[in-house]
Image (spheres, rainbow, N blue to C red):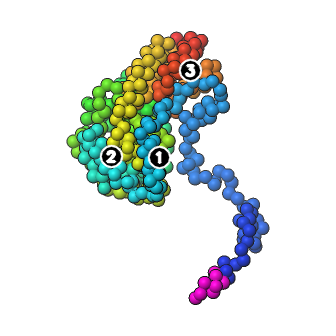
């Protein structure tokens, strides 16, 4: 068939060209004029599972902050540093070289190799870069993939609380059931084997750990890690270990639960670049774990994300290969601010447990007798300081607020001064 004949065949198959009409779908059936009006009620348009999820307590709060001027924010869990220059340069260079394509679903091999070397050095485990490491769109995606890869409907996931805001919703979206174990200031917000074991049932599939912790800043002692590892082995549980703050520890090195005997085969380690390398906007993280689980995670990832952005992958490799100095510099700054804020909060009467990692202080607001939401909202309205109500991290966070010290020393000092005034005015005990 020649080109003209082909064109005419195609034309008759497609019909005459029509200008695009926004209403084209409104009454396409032609025969049923009620077609348009038979719209599902708004409630039914959204899946019941999604409807059941509460909006993130943090977001709701930041919508309020966004409308105000002159606010000093200790709210966002995000470094106040920009990504180090050499990392940005590498990203720009990769673009100049024309790296703009998709990558392997697993991520570029050179990055996976760098991650493998890093993990061997950092947590002492050897991961095969070809089968045991997956590069993801932030740790956020990795949490979701890990849960979806392992859960059957009704499977239970044990989550120590207070906890990062995505864990419970992602568990529910994956068909699982979050089982909360409260941690308290009395045990340094650490999960202990003793607290954990009574929550295990026949349906328990995994424990989701986050140490160093958001929002409390707690780390797990060696004994507690050991105790949890032995419970996981005893009950044949998987562990999802979100170690995104692993580089930000201020007294002693981070220890991963995956480094305990026989734990590598039952642990999915999640980590990323957002916090330690100040790369939140690049959206890059990774999972390292047993090859069957990583393969299952890749199955989902290839359909929903395809791959992490190539520019971010190039930048992340640079961060791992040459980013130690800058990482250390930022960590030292956080440590100075940590000491400042913890001392300041305690002095103004908000008893503050000493955070050993991450960049959050989690003071008790008991002296004011307010709920955490009331405290945060009134502090914002009256003194223009933004902190996050503790109940955004689950009921176990009630009675506390999260103050991020990923903020400048000047801002921390202003915030402390304003908070001191606020507490003075509202102190009940
Ligand atoms: N996990 C924890 C504990 C976090 O605090 C955060 C961000 O605040 C994330 C995961 C999300 O990290 P990412 O930017 O890599 O998606």
Q: Nearer the viewer, residue 208 or 408?
A: 408
Q: Residue at x 53, y 21 (%)?
A: 411
| Residue wearing tag 3 | 370
Label 2 crowding class (10 Å Cα cut-off): few <14, some 14-19, many 20+? many
Q: Nearer the viewer, mark 2 or mark 1?
A: 1
Q: Position of residue 361 (x, y in %)?
A: 45, 24
Question: Is the CB of mark 3 within 8 Å of ligand 1?
Answer: no
Q: Position of residue 400 (x, y in %)?
A: 49, 24
Image disc number at residue 151 = none
Question: Is the CB of mark 1 within 8 Å of ligand 1?
Answer: no
Q: Residue at x 47, y 46 (%)?
A: 92
N-terminal label among 2 and 1: 1
N-terminal label among 1 and 3: 1
| Residue wearing tag 1 | 92
Whether residue 355 is visible here, answered yes or no, is: no
Is 213 on the left or on the right of 39, as rendered? left
> Does 10 sit above or below residue 46?
below
Mark 3 and mark 2 residues within 8 Å of each other at the beta carbon: no
Find out whether residue 230 is within the magenta segment. Answer: no
**Picture quarter containing residue 197?**
top left
Check the image and name the residue furthest to the bottom: 1
Give the magenta part as a residue range.
1-10
| Residue wearing tag 2 | 115
Check the image and name the residue furthest to the right: 33
Mark 1 and mark 3 residues within 8 Å of each other at the beta carbon: no
The span from disc 1 to disc 3 (Cα, nearest Å) is 49 Å
Predominant secondary structure in magenta? helix
> Does 108 sit above or below residue 371?
below
């Amino acid at each position: 068939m020649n080109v003209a004949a082909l064109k005419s065949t195609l034309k008759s198959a497609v019909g005459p060209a029509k200008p695009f009409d926004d209403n084209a779908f409104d009454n396409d059936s032609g025969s049923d004029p009620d077609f348009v009006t038979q719209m599902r009620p708004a409630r039914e348009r959204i899946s019941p599972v999604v409807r059941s999820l509460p909006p993130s307590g943090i977001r709701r709060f930041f919508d309020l902050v966004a409308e105000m001027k002159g606010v000093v924010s200790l709210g966002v869990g995000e470094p106040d540093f920009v990504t180090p220059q050499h990392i940005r340069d590498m990203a720009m260079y990769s673009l100049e070289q024309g790296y703009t394509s998709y990558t392997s679903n697993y991520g570029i091999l050179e990055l996976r190799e760098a991650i493998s070397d890093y993990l061997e050095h950092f947590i002492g485990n050897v991961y095969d870069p070809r089968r045991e490491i997956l590069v993801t769109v932030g740790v956020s995606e990795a949490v979701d993939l890990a849960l979806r890869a392992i859960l059957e409907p009704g499977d239970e996931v044990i989550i120590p609380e207070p906890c990062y805001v995505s864990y419970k919703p992602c568990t529910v979206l994956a068909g699982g059931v979050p089982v909360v174990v409260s941690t308290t200031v009395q045990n340094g917000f650490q999960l202990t084997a003793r607290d954990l074991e009574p929550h295990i049932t026949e349906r328990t599939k995994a424990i989701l750990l986050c140490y160093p912790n958001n929002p409390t800043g707690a780390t797990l002692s060696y004994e507690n890690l050991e105790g949890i590892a032995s419970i996981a082995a005893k009950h044949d549980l998987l562990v999802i270990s979100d170690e995104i703050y692993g580089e930000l520890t201020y007294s002693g090195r981070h220890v991963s639960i995956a480094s305990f005997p026989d734990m590598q085969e039952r642990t999915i380690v999640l980590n990323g670049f957002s916090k330690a390398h100040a790369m939140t906007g690049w959206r890059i993280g990774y999972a390292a774990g047993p090859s069957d689980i990583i393969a299952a995670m890749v199955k989902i990832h290839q359909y929903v994300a395809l791959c992490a952005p190539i520019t971010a992958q190039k930048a992340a490799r640079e961060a791992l290969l040459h980013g130690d100095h800058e990482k250390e510099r930022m960590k030292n700054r956080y440590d100075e601010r940590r000491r400042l804020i913890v001392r300041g909060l305690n002095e103004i009467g908000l008893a503050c447990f000493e955070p050993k990692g991450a960049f959050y202080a989690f003071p008790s607001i008991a002296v004011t007798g307010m709920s955490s939401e009331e405290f945060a909202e009134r502090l914002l309205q009256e003194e223009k300081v933004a902190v996050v109500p503790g109940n955004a991290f689950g009921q176990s966070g009630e009675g506390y607020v999260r103050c991020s010290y990923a903020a400048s020393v000047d801002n921390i000092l202003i915030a402390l001064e304003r908070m001191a005034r606020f507490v003075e005015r509202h102190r009940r005990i």
